[in-house]
Image (cartoon, rainbow, N blue to C red):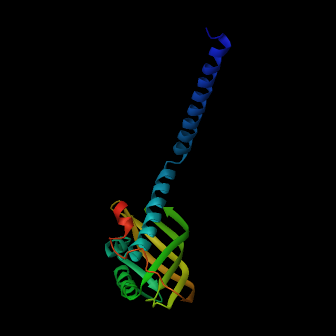
Amino acid sequence: MPSSQTLRMPVLVGVLSLGVVLGIFAAGTVVVGQDPSALDELVAKDAIREQIYNYGRGLDRMDKPLALSVFHPDATVAIGAEMTGAEWVESAWRTHEQIAAHSHQMTNILIKVDGDSAVSESYFMASLRAEPTSETANTTLHVGRYVDRWSKRSGRWAMDHREIVVDFRTTHVSTGPNPTSAGRRDTTDPSYGIYQ
């Protein structure tokens, strides 16, 4: 028969565990209770961040509907001259169709939400690889920032305006064998098999 000491230990552990769980629940309730908009802000930031990533994926996979979905229909883009979001995507398409491969990365994403409006700054690196030969290839790296204004309309966050700030460009010429990319610039890319 177990001793009373042995029986007390599980009871004590159970009481302490229950206290920890109740404490976490109470702390969460207090935080949300003090600022119910905090959760809305986190959800908005996540939706905007995903749109920023959708833009890069849309361009790199040449998925025009995905790239266009980042912009509201009346959105504008400024890069020297100003154009509509749709005109910017068409312009990017003409450039990307003429090169062998491209890769966009978004980093240092800062988002500030104010109700159904928001602003963000995202650092970007866009590597554009010209058509390689068997001996050489030119890769141009564009480094800069996207300065964006967003709004939530009919429950969907999308871009109102983007200013593209290019901080610098550099070109690298490589020599030697140029293996073919395993990535695809369409929906036959392996990523579309698991994520759409």
Above or below for 190 versus 181: above
**In this rendering, position of residue 139 left or right of residue 2:** left
Q: Residue at x 50, y 69 (%)?
A: 119
Image coordinates of residue 43 in percent, x first then y, are 46, 55
Toward the right, the furthest residue is 5
Q: Is residue 128 visible?
A: yes
Above or below for 5 versus 155: above
Instruction: Pick the residue in front: 83 or 34.
Output: 83
Image coordinates of residue 136 in percent, x first then y, are 51, 91
Q: Say how many tags the image has.
A: 0
Q: Residue at x 64, y 21 (%)?
A: 12
**In this rendering, position of residue 33 left or right of residue 192:** right
Q: Quadrant of the N terminus?
A: top right
Q: Quadrant of the C terminus?
A: bottom left
Res 65 quadrant in image = bottom left
Instruction: Pick the residue in front: 73 or 165.
Output: 165
Instruction: Pick the residue in front: 87 or 190.
Output: 190
Above or below for 188 versus 167: above
Image coordinates of residue 172 in percent, x first then y, are 56, 88
Res 31 quadrant in image = top right
**In this rendering, position of residue 184 left or right of residue 6:** left
Q: Is residue 83 visible?
A: no
Image coordinates of residue 73 in percent, x first then y, are 32, 75
Q: Residue at x 38, y 67 (%)?
A: 190
Res 24 quadrant in image = top right
